Image: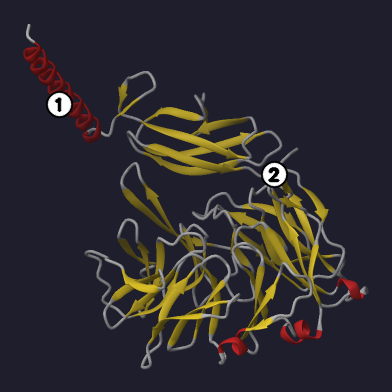
Amino acid sequence: MSSNKIQKFLLFFFIILTLVLATFVVILYVNNSKVTDHGIVTNSGIIRITTDPTNVSYNVYLDDKKQNLVDNRINDVTNGQYTIKVQAQNYTDWTKKVIVKNGIVTDLLVKLFPSKLSITQVTQTNIGKAFVSIDGLYIYYVVKSSEFGSDTGIWRVATEQSTSFFTQIDQNPLKLTDMTTQIQSVITGSDYTLTPNIDNTKLLIHDRKNNKFYVLNASDFNSTITDIGQMVGFVPDNASWMVDGSDLLVSTQNILFDLNINSGTTNLIEYRPNYKIIYANNETSVYVYENSEKALYKYQNQKLTKIDLKNIAITEDVTAITVPGQNSNVLLLKTASGYYYLNLTRLYIKDILNGVKNPNLVTTSNDGTSSLFSTDSNLCYIFNAIDNIASNSIETKETKIDEVDCSSAGYVAFAPQSTHLIYLYKIDSSIRSIEPDGSNKSILITDASLQPFANFNRQSDYLFVLMKDDSTSTSKTNLYKVQLVNK
């Protein structure tokens, strides 16, 4: 056989093989089937389990029937809804209702809490207020009153101890500044916030009573704070961190600009003399919405660039935008009628809590998958949006959360990892955890001395809380850590 005939035969064979494989894949897709590790096509689904902590032995029950796991998976689960329960020795049970679809792998993150918790005191002082960094790595706290004058000032403590070739994180409290006359004049009373930048080298101090903004260099002890109003020549309405932590996004009703703290240089982003600028930002992205054009813009490379929303149409005027702390591809848009969830990657939009009267956004999770809303009657709702790549869909869910006080007097926050909601239940003075879909409510600690502050560290192996040392009028408030992993 000539080489030309051989080439034609191989080409023909390759085309036939490709068509057979393509037909096989189409059949699998149409029938929602899958190929198992043994090469068998089945009409069933898989439940894959990842526990936190990972190094625990556990048993899994599907509708009360014990399952034999293969590589942390339950194979050959037929289409339908199930109740799954995970049990591990010395941990509380984890339970959730799941829907399994043929040919789809359902991934479950199982957060297990110890049945008995150990608590360790972290500070020996008297904390007025505490704030957590966006990554959960540090807790910043203010001491304004103490029997020891050397205790007063702004402090920082790491939530975990880590050592690498390049950096070393010490868990001992570090004082950033004394309670100088300048600092004391800024944080009078309790109406103030501390917001660290993305690399925890600077603090943005917001005197909410006078609506003034200041920056403290957290790397230089007792450094002079910078008055943002004096720096730009007027009192801004708002300021927030952006880019690499050296720039602030500063705004008034009609002006929006980028301010570099180190150089003092500014870059005008938007000026609209006749109406309020609608914008939002996290530390990596800035978005501006133009109601006159019904258009969304992104600030990048020192200019506004229009985003092509394809066939998405927003007919109402947008009154506010929110972007999650660590996901710039999700936006929440507020209008006169309510809220919209907008996914910029998938170009998907959905109205939120349609039918709920006067919802108000309280907070969003860092990854943008969950948002907490309150109502005029202090009811709490959570909106979830999960991008399911396997089924090529965004799955949304709205859940009413009982017990949680969403008013300004309550305490509720998402953990830095976005996996849990932490809240103070006032009736029994307990810190509780609940998953964003409303499942797996856990009482983590109950104590009458608990104060409205709690959060996990990055690995979720510790919960940090504020507690009064006793119930007397001279009691002190300190930071405690609750161990969430049995060691």
Q: Nearer the viewer, residue 275 or 472?
A: 275
Report the disc number at residue 167: none
| Left or right of 393 in this view: 232 | right
Name the residue located 73 percent from the left edge and 52 percent from the top edge.
169
Residue labelled with disc 1: 19
Instruction: Tell me if residue 338 can be seen.
Output: no
Q: Amino acid at mark 2?
A: Phe
x and y percentages locating residue 179 in the rendered image: 81, 79
Image quadrant for the C terminus? top right
In this rendering, is residue 330 above or below 234?
above
| Left or right of 430 in this view: 197 | left
Image quadrant for the N terminus? top left
Q: Amino acid at mark 1?
A: Leu
Q: Which is closer to the viewer, label 2 or label 1?
A: 2
Name the residue located 78 percent from the left edge and 84 percent from the top edge.
184
To which quarter of the image does residue 299 belong?
bottom left
x and y percentages locating residue 178 in the rendered image: 82, 75
Q: Nearer the viewer, residue 273 or 318?
A: 273
Residue farthest to the right, as pictured: 147
Do the residues under discs 2 and 1 have CB atoms within 8 angstroms?
no
x and y percentages locating residue 393 in the rendered image: 32, 49
| Left or right of 47 in this view: 174 | right
Q: Secondary structure at mark 1?
A: helix
Instruction: Tell me if residue 92 can be seen.
Output: yes
Q: How many marks?
A: 2
